[in-house]
Amino acid sequence: MTELWNWRIDGAAPDEVYPALAEALGRVVMPLAVADPARLPTYAVICDVWQAPGEFGTIVDCYGVPESLHELSAVAALARLLDRDCLLPDDTLDAGRHLLVAPDGTIRPVHFEITETDDGEVLSARRLCTLAHPGCRGWSRCCRSRWQPDSVNPALAAA
């Protein structure tokens, strides 16, 4: 079985993301626009990288990622290689809540306001997921997450 990963990066150009992604994954990375399924090596990962407006406007989709690769390890390595913060969806299914992965490997939950535009979702107004905010307390989705409010966890792969 294969997986789909979807990440956002703070201010990285697509042409610098592809080589860093190949190094982070330890695989050949083929851009979606030129990937020919009939001629792909079995170990290749197909990726699409594009720019969108707003914070964390560089969007990365990885298709057909082998189960043997671990998403948190890969995004932590990518953040370190690019020296940029990265975002990935968390386990709450709350569209505005993400995991922020810093270049030093620190992972923490954050919230964004999301605005739908003709160019896609725009993220703005970042804030930490903290029990000091009423929306993150009590029976909120945040408290049922593996990534509790106010949590800060190291990513072992970024070391």
Image (spheres, rainbow, N blue to C red):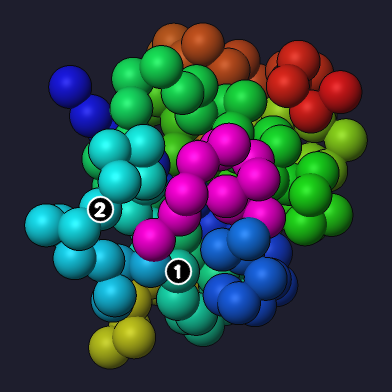
In the rendered image, the vertical position of residue 62 relative to residue 57, given as above or below: above
Q: In which quadrant will I find the C terminus?
A: top right
As shown in the figure, which amino acid type bears the numbered disc 1?
Answer: Val
Instruction: Give the labeled residue for mark 1.
Output: 49
In the rendered image, the vertical position of residue 48 relative to residue 1, given as above or below: below
- The residue drawn where x is 30% and y is 46% is 41
- The residue drawn where x is 50% and y is 29% is 71
- Is 4 left or right of 25, judged from the image as shown? left
Q: In which quadrant will I find the N terminus?
A: top left
Instruction: Give the labeled residue for mark 2.
Output: 40
As shown in the figure, which amino acid type bears the numbered disc 2?
Answer: Leu
In the rendered image, the vertical position of residue 123 relative to residue 78, given as above or below: below
Q: Position of residue 83 (x, y in %)?
A: 84, 54
Mark 1 to mark 2 CA distance (whole Å) = 18 Å
- The magenta segment: 20-30
Q: Position of residue 144 (x, y in %)?
A: 44, 11
